[in-house]
Image (cartoon, rainbow, N blue to C red):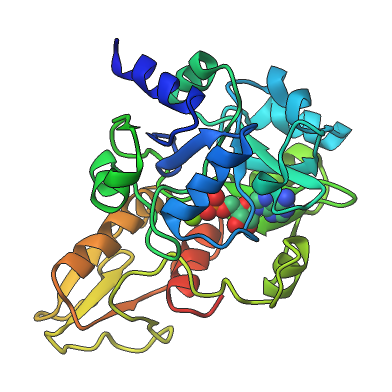
Amino acid sequence: MDELEQAAAALRAGGLVGMPTETVYGLAADALDAAAVLRVFAAKGRPTFDPLIVHLPDAGWLERVAVPSPRARLLAAACWPGPLTLVLPRTAAVPDAVTAGLDTVAVRVPDHPLARELIRRCGRPLAAPSANRFGCVSPTTAAHVREQLGAAVAVVLDGGPCRIGVESTVLRPDPLPVILRPGGCTRERLEELLGEPVALAGREDRAAALALPAPGMLASHYAPAAPLTLREPGAPWPADPALGLLAFTGAGLPAGPRHEVLSARGDLAEAAAALFAALRRLDAAGVRAIIAEEVPAHGLGLAINDRLRRAAGKG
Ligand code: AMP
Ligand code: MG
């Protein structure tokens, strides 16, 4: 039995699988099996009020789990497979465990051949959050998944390092399009495709969309073990050698502290792909604290800055 078949069999039996996608690695379970889905929450230590994204092999499966609107159909046709998650009214097939009891479900088609083949072989949509312990940095390699969740999964499929490196953009297309979480699909592209403005939800709106018991509860997320602080724009980098510095282009870095440069040529896509592994390396180096700088706030920069602010606990 090859590894893919082994993974599909484990999923059909209610088990968990580490699944490569183009964004980050997912911790996958059969989305239509409530008991399997609850195992995902338990393995991650994720609160059950935080709903999961359902992954499909192609847009043809959409009606099995959701009721698409005209905007949803347009975006699915243009952006899938790809890093765009649509929040749509759900069908009765989707268990409450997946949606945290909401009447909407988040769905996408990942742009990774192994992920889509796995879902096809399993024959069921897969619910998958990022394959890390809740609140920690998301995994962008199979080794990251094995380190944190190796004991909880039947198989980790190795699809190489993630091409995009930050999670999908979560968009609620109706009644008016709102980005609930910035991610791998840019706001500019969505506005171009829809021909209308796309709003960016603040922390309060996000909490309301998720019906969270306490707004802002999930402000601290995607966090490394070392405390992370954002450098004031324009302020010099500190030179304390016990610190770890997370820089965009590396301009003006002092000698002394350990540092990571996300993209020397200032490319936001390259920076996004490098972000989570860089945070992990600074942690592994045992730095006392991490000082990071925000990147330009356009394109993938929105997703990078969102993750940095949440790593700093600033939502
Ligand atoms: P993760 O699986 O960690 O990438 O996170 C998935 C995120 O998708 C959740 O934390 C929510 O922000 C969002 N999400 C999932 N389902 C819904 C939904 N039904 N309504 C709004 N947001 C959702
Ligand atoms: Mg996550």
Quadrant where the C terminus lies? Answer: bottom right
Left or right of residue 66, residue 219 in this image? left
How far across and down, in percent of the image, does residue 313 sit? 48, 79
Left or right of residue 97, residue 175 in this image? right
Tell me if I can see residue 129 in this picture: no
Asked if residue 118 is positioned above or below residue 52 in the image, the reply reads above
How far across and down, in percent of the image, does residue 214 sit? 69, 78
| Towards the viewer: 228 or 118 | 118
User: Where, by quadrant of the figure, is residue 84 drawn?
Assistant: top right
Query: Residue drawn at (79%, 46%), measured in percent from left and top?
Result: 104
User: Where, by quadrant of the figure, is residue 249 drawn?
Assistant: bottom left
All told, the count of numbered labels is 0
How far across and down, in percent of the image, does residue 130 sit? 46, 48
Quadrant where the N terminus lies? Answer: top left
| Towards the viewer: 273 or 56 | 56
| Towards the viewer: 291 or 172 | 172
Tell me if I can see residue 221 in this picture: yes
Instruction: Tell which residue pokes out farthest to the top in this image.
Output: 1
Left or right of residue 79, residue 16 in this image? left
Asked if residue 126 is positioned above or below residue 269 in the image, the reply reads above
Query: Residue drawn at (38%, 75%), measured in percent from left and top?
Result: 293
How far across and down, in percent of the image, does residue 145 sit? 31, 46
Left or right of residue 10, residue 281 in this image? left
User: Where, by quadrant of the figure, is residue 78 drawn?
Assistant: top right
Asked if residue 311 is positioned above or below residue 30 in the image, the reply reads below
Query: Residue drawn at (58%, 44%), measured in percent from left and top?
Result: 185
Query: Residue drawn at (44%, 42%), measured in percent from left and top?
Result: 27
Asked if residue 211 is positioned above or below residue 112 in the image, the reply reads below
